[in-house]
Image (cartoon, coloured by chain):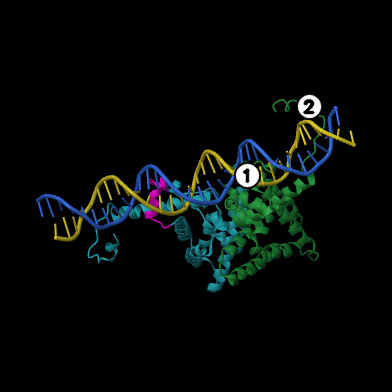
Chain colours: A cyan, B green, C blue, D yellow
Amino acid sequence: MALTGIRVRAYSYAVRYSKEHKAQNHENILSVAARSFREHGGDSSGIGTVMKKVGLTKGGFYRHFRSKDDLFVEAVARAFDEMGRGMLEVAKSAPEGQALRAMIEHYLSPRHANSPGMGCVVSALGPELARKPLSVRKRIEVSREAYRERILPFVPGKTREEELAKFQLLFPSMAGVLTSARMTLSATRREQLLMEARNFFTKCFAEE
Amino acid sequence: MALTGIRVRAYSYAVRYSKEHKAQNHENILSVAARSFREHGGDSSGIGTVMKKVGLTKGGFYRHFRSKDDLFVEAVARAFDEMGRGMLEVAKSAPEGQALRAMIEHYLSPRHANSPGMGCVVSALGPELARKPLSVRKRIEVSREAYRERILPFVPGKTREEELAKFQLLFPSMAGVLTSARMTLSATRREQLLMEARNFFTKCFAEE
DNA sequence: TGTACATCAGTGAACGCGCGTTCACTGATGTAC
DNA sequence: TGTACATCAGTGAACGCGCGTTCACTGATGTAC
């Protein structure tokens, strides 16, 4: 055993399942986790549950990730990516000059409010992310910045600083409103809040 | 034992500790919990830790609360109350007509961003609250509404509906920005974000 | 062509740990008589 | 005035449970020879 580590491997052995098979399971774990974390929070969604939903047993988890923290970081990255992809689609299929408006309406839609598992990471996990240890927060900030960079081209502004400043106000504010909407029990009051917020943010950020 | 339950009690017996002593411990548990929940989240701050900080053992907890959920609800109520009290102080010591502006500056201060354990419940626990079972959310909504009613007199508006609409936009938005600020690793970027947000919200809501 | 064997994704049982909760007990109190 | 006793806040050990993690094992694969 100890010797094999030193021995030069001139060829690669076959694996039980194809590389594609493993990659597929890896993807499945990630996307199930990305949803589960946003839906139930990091502490309340366990590895066992995630793996069962993927169709595997929890023991196999560690062939894919080194720890739950690792999964968390990668699932959050996946969630930011999904969210970014959705936003880009909305922006690109909006009429000329209406991209940001369309994104605001998408973000503050009842649909988004009612499906946290498929929605914005900040609104679903923000405070929890802020409490994570530094090493985790550093990695999460990277994927958050990637998300921001995808949205930024659709934020009006003369300079990049101006765009950044607007983004940093608009998106966190919308996240807060969305969280607040999710806290609101009455469906009519929730939808009213979302509507007022759509009007407000559109007027402030997406009108010329 | 079984019989004593049926017997009519014509008087009340003395207790080991005075009523004040128990009430004091009750208060201590609540305020330690209110802080601990906001600092570490509901799942990560345990009854044992809270009781130890109060100077008691965890077994005694159930002489004060029926369950952890009960503590959570009451601690959140306490947190809303503390927050409301602080806000009122800020509002009342502000110059004439500057109350809301002062509250915005207080809310979006670096001090508030750096001490989640003593700050806004929505910013520290929002998504978690939205995930709680209905019975818990109902009780929490009550204390949130009490908080809102204390702030409302300082929100400008011709009708109550107008004030409500403004409150519902301003405070959740600020909560989102605060959470986002707490997620931001760079202290300078965090303070810059807070400053920009103070300017923005003041301009939008507290200027005539 | 045949066979021994290195591979590693996935299994399922087990581990230690901390949690919320329970419970028999303690002991200071002060009322009942 | 004296004493038996009901009280209940708080103690500390124990409970069951689910969690993240570990590990010996399985078994299909296909290369080395």
**Whole-percent x, y for residue B36 in the image:** 64, 55
Q: Say which element carries label 1.
A: helix
Residue B116 locus on image (x, y percent): 64, 60
Can residue A57 be found in the magenta stretch? yes
Q: Can residue B119 be seen in this view?
A: no
What is the CA distance from the residue labelled 2 to the residue labelled 1?
A: 33 Å
Q: In the displayed image of the protein, which residue is found farthest to the bottom?
A: A159
| Amino acid bearing label 1 | Asp
Label 2 environment density (alpha carbons within 10 Å; few <14, some 14–19, many ≥20)? few
Q: Mark 2 or mark 1, which is nearer to you?
A: 2
Q: In which quarter of the image is the N terminus of chain B?
A: top right
Residue at label 1? B69
Percent of width and height locating residue A100: 53, 62
Q: What is the chain identity of the residue bearing mark 2?
A: B
Tell me if residue B196 can be seen.
yes
Nearest the viewer among B164 and A202 is: B164
Q: What stretch is highlighted in magenta?
A: A51-66
| Secondary structure character of the magenta stretch overall | helix
User: Looking at the image, which residue is at 45% across and 50% down?
Assistant: A47
Q: x, y (%) of residue B60?
A: 67, 44
The residue singled out by tag 2 in the image is B8
Report the side of C32 relative to B135 (left or right).
right
Query: Which quarter of the figure has residue A185?
Result: top right
Count of marks placed on residues: 2
Judge by depth and name the residue closer to the eye, A75 or A206.
A75
Q: In which quarter of the image is the C terminus of chain B?
A: bottom right
Side of A192 where B147 appears, left or right: right
Up the image or down, A60 lies above or below A141; here it is above
Question: Label 2 is placed on what type of residue?
Answer: Val
